[in-house]
Amino acid sequence: MTEVGWAKRSVPTRRDQPAVPRRVSRLRFAHSTFLVDRAPFLVACLMLAVLVAIYGALRDGVFTLEELNLDAAASMALLLAATGQTIVLLRGGIDLSIGGMISLGTVIAATEFGDSWTTALPWGIAIPVIGLLVGMTNGLLISLLRLQPFLVTLATWSILSGAALLILPTDGGTLPQGWMAFGNASLVGLSTSVWILLVLFLFWLWFSKTRLGVTIRATGSNEKSAFLSGVSITFVNVATYGLSGFFAALAALYLTTQTGSGSPTIGKDYILPSVAAAVIGGISLFGGRGGLAGTVIGAFILTIIGNLVFVLSVSSYWQPIVSGVILLVAVLASSLAERSARRSVT
Amino acid sequence: MALLEVSAVNKRFGGITALRNAAFRAEAGEVHALIGENGAGKSTFIQILAGAVRPDAGTIQFKGAPFTAQNPSAAQAAGISAVFQELSLIPDLTIEQNIWFRREALTPFGTVRAGGMRRETLALFDRYGFPIARPDREVRRLTLADRQLVEIAKALARDPTVLILDEATSALAPRETEWLLALAANLASEGKLVIYISHRLQEVRHVAKRITVFRNGTTVAEHDTDAVSEDEIIAEMLGRRLERLYPERKATATRRVALRVRGLSAGQRLAHVDIDLREGEVLGVGGLQGHGQRELFQALFGIGRARGTVELWGKPLTGHGPRQRLSGGRDGIALVPEDRRGQGLLLSKSVAENLTLSVIPRFSRRGFLSGSRERALVDDMIRFLRIKARTPDQLAGTLSGGNQQKVIFGKMLLTEARVLLLYDPTRGVDVGTKGEIFVLMRELAAKGYAILFYSSDLPELVHVADRVAVMRNGSIAAVLAGDAISEEGILKAAMSASERSG
């Protein structure tokens, strides 16, 4: 065949269709983005390793099970709240109301649990259900009123905080002795919080692979495309914020095992740290990208910073300063990774 | 009996009539082309078939029964899958997750069967000879062309009886286009119906057995492809005779070099490019897709890092970034980018705001915008380019593709830069607007503008450019001029001996 003939045939005619369309080889996929895609997470792991190394150099007994139990306990309330926040961030939203929900959860527990398991148990189940319903209401409001998640959850945060203050104006209340003992029990050397951590990991392994998990992430990645693919955005929002409220309530229950009381104002300490933990762990605020492993690393980083400040016996006001710097490093890492990826592809 | 028979379909959006008495009839086992200018109602029509839009009136018979899909899922279940122009992929999911999204096979625990999904995907790719490797790549890492292929895979995964391809080749390279056209023909020979929408009449004539022409929301003609000429089809689309698509090419180039590029290199895709673009010249950039054309345009517009020297009107060009390029005013460089909706326009802003976006400093006094001066220039530009907008305040996203492209041209012209980079400016633009764009390009050249012009459509380079620089592996393989410019010449230069076997 002459060259001219080939050129003329560059568009096939329906008269000379090949039996099987020809496979066209492509080199466009040669470049691997494995490291680039995980750069934010890897940077977070590196930062945690460095912080733990410094901590270990300053203090004995850092690399023991005992220390893991302590750090898990110190991180757990934040981690539970951040798990819900992670799901919301993957959806491309944000949930400020968890602060109100956590406060409300602790004061309900502190006023209703009483002194015996017979009253504590039903309420222990009721509080997560309340969290779920409150969160689902957030999702409904966002979808039906077509409002910004930031504003809706800011409003519900305020409402829930007020409700908590009405129920219990100051820190206090009582919880059954067994309740706190349960929170600080240990099994085969691992404390309750380490076991919760393991359960959280298992939950995430499962959840991130379910159709709902994929759909939430997909909706955060591109809402319009998800809608065109048959996703009900209302359902996704209700599920996402419902889960967030549920985890906030779990965080409240966990907090009560540690403090032994209810606090109508404690929740506000978890709103932005829950976002920070997720972002430090590599979760994109634009939705669609990241996982719980990153959030766990992020929460541990924030906890270790607290430990370090304590060990160094400097002013505790250094803690937010260091946390802020770490947050900046994390955000920079994801940004640089994204830029380099873009360069290598286009 | 026809597989698909549509009659007397009407559809209005607010005050605008999109379809009026539209009719369409197609048999199983054919590739049936649907053509018309942008705004002729093709998109609305296929959205109705795809279940995304419901008609106000009319009947649709599919497989001999009334077709009443309420949503895309229902239409797909009935056997009609559409590959839309507006991509429906999820950037952060992988290729395979996208293809099977919401239809994944699940384990008893409710999780997605990853292994099964991989097997199904590879089987699908194999069956249709998809030119895609690595189904685990995330879609956001893919080029526009690859995303288009994934979109097609997603539609085919539903094993449709009717496959609708809406401008599916507009993002594809020649070889991928060839593959898709062969695929369409194969599907038809298997007894499927392929509804093929394209502005490229050459493709349409090659692949389609029958052609239905839409104009102003109405079906104006249906032909056997063999029984009708290209000119007749264009006349039916436009409702008038188009004198000629390509304007006369007068030699307006002077000896003065507007843009001198020496040894320009960037990344792995651009190596030692030398270019002399003259005042009054349209210099075409050709070659197979992915051989450095995109990188060349980006480097010249100051995006990313590049080595080498660039002289603009005799002065060395330094610095980075579009802002620097545009800041030159009459001595600057302006770009019509590849991705009209993503890079060229703010879809949710008005036509006026888009036009003046690059030149805001000129309208501002002490940081505040001066409305009246802006408005006067905007009105001039809308008139000059004949942009069909109801008012300058109409949102850019609601314009037809051709008019969106005109807004981008207007935005570029308002910068007053006289070196213009046009990256595939007619992609997905209707034939009438294409003609206007070519006329405009020649007019600008006659006024002393210097234009670098890349097109994925070979005939455009042949008929519009004064010279054509053909790129291969990131370098200029040949510069064709005069009679040497032909489709064969460009293709020959684009493909080295080693690549021809592919």
Image (cartoon, rainbow, N blue to C red):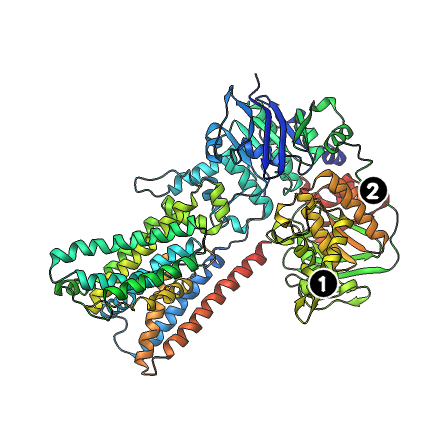
Q: Earlier in the sequence, mark 1 or mark 2?
A: 2
Q: Quadrant of the N terminus of chain B?
A: top right
In the rendered structure, find residue B326 and report the number of the disc placed on it. Answer: 1
Using residue B422 as the reference point, say whether residue B84 is left or right of it. Answer: left
Q: Nearer the viewer, residue B311 or A144?
A: A144
- Vertical order, A48 against B467 (above or below): below
Q: Which residue is mark 2?
A: B247
Chain for mark 1?
A: B
Chain for mark 2?
A: B
Dot 1 crowding, Cα within 10 Å, few <14, some 14–19, many 20+: many
Q: Secondary structure at mark 1?
A: helix
Number of numbered discs on residues: 2
Say which residue appears at 72% left-offset and 57% top-offset. B375
Say which residue appears at 34% left-offset and 83% top-offset. A314
Using residue A292 as the reference point, say whether residue B400 is left or right of it. Answer: right
Can the viewer see residue B420 in this picture? yes
Can the viewer see residue A193 in this picture? no
